[in-house]
Amino acid sequence: MISIENLTKFYGKFKAVDGLTLEIPDGSVFGFVGPNGAGKTTTMKIITGLLSASGGKVTIDGVDIIEHPEFIGDKVGYMPDFFGTYDNLRADEYLEFYAGMYKVPPDEIPQLVDDLLELVDLTDKKYAYVDSLSRGMKQRLCLARSLVHDPSLLILDEPASGLDPRARFEMKEILKQLKNMGKTVIISSHILPELAEMCTHVGIIDHGVVKSYGSISEIMQNMQKERVFSIKTLGNTGFEEINSLLLELPYTENISVNTDEITFSFRGDEDSLARFVKDVAAKGIPMVGFTEKQGNLEDIFMELTGDEENDGTK
């Protein structure tokens, strides 16, 4: 469990992080969502030990890493948004170099390199020079680098930035594997639909303050002012009867009868909804679809942060 309590960071008089408080469950893929200047990268760099905090507390597995930064090295793997230049290293040499830095026993390094290259699907590029790799391949190699010491927490800053659709898909598949391996992953990104696909939890921050955080379904439910449902029937039959039942149902609004479905907004309780479904079935209407339409992360983001991006530090 990663716990952040009242975290603050000043750059001179500018407050980049303002009392940020949240918890990130073990084994989750957590997405930091926020406009430029929201404090995402600053917070992530504090967790990695690359920046000092002005105040507050960050604990990983119960250890305050601000008080005990020596604890970070074994627990945290960091993938920055900028790869760097390694003109004269092959992919295997690149990983060997970092494995040595993390004091991996020399006799274990060859197998480790092979395993990591296989994980990120770069086995066929083992002897390729880093500078010759595509951006997507470099991102995957950089991810492999962050795993050389087998950290329990991975922090990835904009891992899908600048990637083409195929490379983004490959990155998402690797993140799924990491989650299945029990890793906790923190990601920052501006590509909100992809965060919704990749992450189990998100934190929406603006001006260094957490606006909302939790599982994506929890955030959606908390932010939605009303629930919207869609009904489909076999052969589009029974729409008139369903419409009549909806008109009698309390807290039902915005009923729309289309050619292939009926949609409506609902503010009532679960018991009322269950009785409605039972009444539809009692009339013998062949209902083949009854689904709740979900909002999307972009709508929630715009509502919480406004439509203007901040200036300042990330």
Image (cartoon, rainbow, N blue to C red):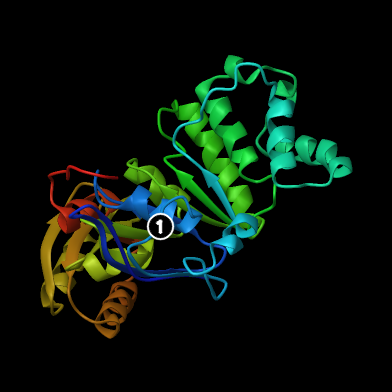
- Residue that lies at the very extreme toward the bottom in this rendered image: 271
Q: What is the quadrant of the C terminus in the image? A: top left
In the image shown, does 27 or 208 lie closer to the viewer? 208
Q: Nearer the viewer, residue 3 or 69?
A: 69
Residue 279, visible in the rendered structure: yes
Q: Residue at x 68, y 38 (%)?
A: 98
For residue 195, side relative to residue 111 (left or right) = left
Place of residue 119 in the rendered image (x, y in percent of width and height, measured from the top left): 69, 40
Please indicate whether residue 15 sits to the left or right of residue 162 in the image.
left
Callout 1 amino acid: Ser
Q: Is residue 294 visible?
A: no
Out of 52 and 159, give the one closest to the viewer: 52
Q: Where 9 sits versus 107, above or below?
A: below
Q: Disc 1 marks which residue?
A: 52
Relative horizontal placement of residue 49, taking residue 236 as reference (left or right) = right
The residue depicted at 59 percent of the width and 22 percent of the height is 86
Question: Residue 276 at what x, y percent from top left?
Answer: 26, 77
Where's residue 57, x and y in %? 41, 71
Label 1 Cα neighbours within 10 Å, binned few <14 / some 14-19 / many ≥20: some
Work out whether residue 159 or residue 88 is closer to the camera in this orientation and state it: 88
Number of numbered discs visible in the structure rendering: 1
